[in-house]
Amino acid sequence: MGINKDNLLSDEHHASHFSCAICQDLSESPVTLACSHVFCEFCIGEYVARCLDRQQNALCPTCRASDCSSAAKLSEANPLAFRCYAKVQTRCPLHKQGCAWTGDLGSLQGHLTNSDSHLQKGMSQGDVYDALKREGDERYRARAYDQAAELYSKAAAVAPERAQAFANRAACRLMAHRYEECVQDCDQALRRDPALANAATRRARALLELGRTEDAQRGLRDFAATNGGGQAVGDEARRVDRVATAVADGRRAFADGDLMHARASFAGALRDAESAPVVLGAAAAELGLGKIDRCLRLCLQVLRRADAARWRPAALVVRGAATLLSDEGSQAVEILREALRLDPDGAAPKATLRAALRVVKRRKEARDLATKRSFADAAAAYDRLLADDLAGAGAALDGFPALAVLAARSPLYARCRAERGTCRLRTGDADAALKDCAAALYVVDDLVDAHLCRANALRALGRHAEARKHLKDIIDESWGGSDVRVKHAFEQADFDLRRTKRPDYYALLNCRQVSSEREIKGAYHAQSLLHHPDRHATAPPEVQKAEAEVFKRLGEALDILGDPQKRELYDKGFDKEAIHAKLEAAKRASQNHSCSGGGGCGGCG
């Protein structure tokens, strides 16, 4: 949507270089592509959106050579061309109302908004107001909201008793995310015309963006009671009611600790409004459910808003809490200090920063004690961290849940429980370690430290089969199969299980572990005489079978305990199969070493 060429005074040769090929008018808010063709900023934006909807490449409408994503403001991309553009001669759009001004295109906006313009004798106040309002409407449709607001301001100065100029300026403020100014303009419009519906709806939308849902509800309710409302007012009132109800439900759910209900409520509110308070409420709910990434994305969405300055401290508090609960304490402290710098009197930044500093300090204390192998003291420090520092933390934001509620499903909580479980295991309390690991894995099911601690606790309790099965299940998962620590723990658990299932050869031979090789052979001779199959040839079949099995085991015992290498491996816990496998591997390694040495592997005939 460009500038009407009927108002141009420059020759066609000058102005044609800046014509928009989309609207066929002189480009307004001109942008240029890499190919140097010029378009209206609004027109090229609409063109790109249409191409995206059709899943087409947005190429230059004139030459089809350049990508429209390279569009840049003409004043920045080519300052000399912009100076030529600004020198295009034009007359005032209000020339039909008697304005005789002519000049450069770059001076037109200043002329239109000059308080002394258009007040000459013979110019009708109503005509000037209507012309300025129409010109403002043109700028608004071109998304030049600041210029449109200036024109509406001039129209309001020309005819201050008329309400529509204030309502239209409020629309510009709303689109420019200047919500407080929008509310003020709507109040001005409604004082002049209490039945102006678009002013009432714009006021409600701005209040909703400011988080003042109750004021928005009250304003629309009073307007409907006085003027009977209408379709637009009714639709807006229902939307505001849905948002207000959802936000109230979400905050009640926060107070009750029902984070699932809170997330559902704020998700419902987001379908009708994306105001910063609603987005931050949804972020807090996601944080409470352990969805740190979603929380951080929502916080970033608020920080990137055009009105981010107003909400930056609150967004940084939630972002800092999320960073703390994701176990990045030092970074969280930096974020929260920035929030406190921006809002030094705010209760939320102060309380959350104090809580973060306590958590970081206690976590370091507990880890240092564990490093010094003071496991009992470290476990006590983790007790204080979990019971006092996290569970007793203050509210993250006014109306949002306490940090203690948010922490219950956080990675920080899970890691602290796993680390406390490791300390308790080192002090011999395997049952307590299992409880800590179960709590940690409920929150973060792929926390390797918790899985390893659980397996070690099961082994300490003699439940080797459970430990092996637990680690085998992890290895079968896609993430566990590549973890070296998990594989090593599985091998150890498998070794322990096989050791518990192997036969006790010393007991079978009726000798001790310190018995000499000669004593072992003598014990074998004595036991083999007792269990030799020939001695039980007349016994019942089941007895013969049992004695034959014992005799076979006696032979295995002599084979293992009668060989010094095999006996050494057996005493270390290896079973028969593992012993033979290890000796075979050693034999292969020895052969490979002899072949790789000097002299070759045989003669060369």
Image (cartoon, helix red, strand yellow):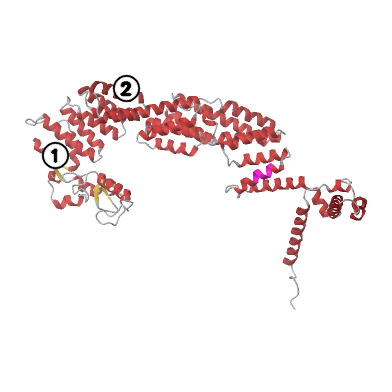
Q: Earlier in the sequence, mark 1 or mark 2?
A: 1
Amino acid type of the residue that numbered disc 1 sits on in the rendered structure: Pro
351 w.r.t. 327: above or below: above
**How would you rate the neighbour count of disc 2 (Cα within 10 Å): few for under 14, some for 14-19, many for 20 or more?**
few
Q: Secondary structure at mark 2?
A: helix
Instruction: Look at the image and give the residue range highlighted in magenta.
Output: 466-471
Residue 467 part of the magenta segment = yes
**Residue 485 makes an appearance in the image:** no
317 is within the stretch colored magenta: no
| Residue placed under numbered mark 2 in the picture | 218
**Residue 48 left/right relative to 532:** left
Q: Of circles 1 and 2, which is in front? A: 2
Relative side of 523 to 262, left or right: right
Report crowding for label 1: few under 14, some 14 to 19, many 20 or more residues within 10 A (C-alpha).
Answer: many
Could you say where residue 342 lies in the image, as x and y percent from the top left?
Answer: 42, 29
Lateral position of residue 225 relative to residue 262, left or right: left
Residue type, mark 2 in image:
Arg
Q: Pointer 1: what residue?
A: 93
Say whether residue 555 is left or right of residue 110: right
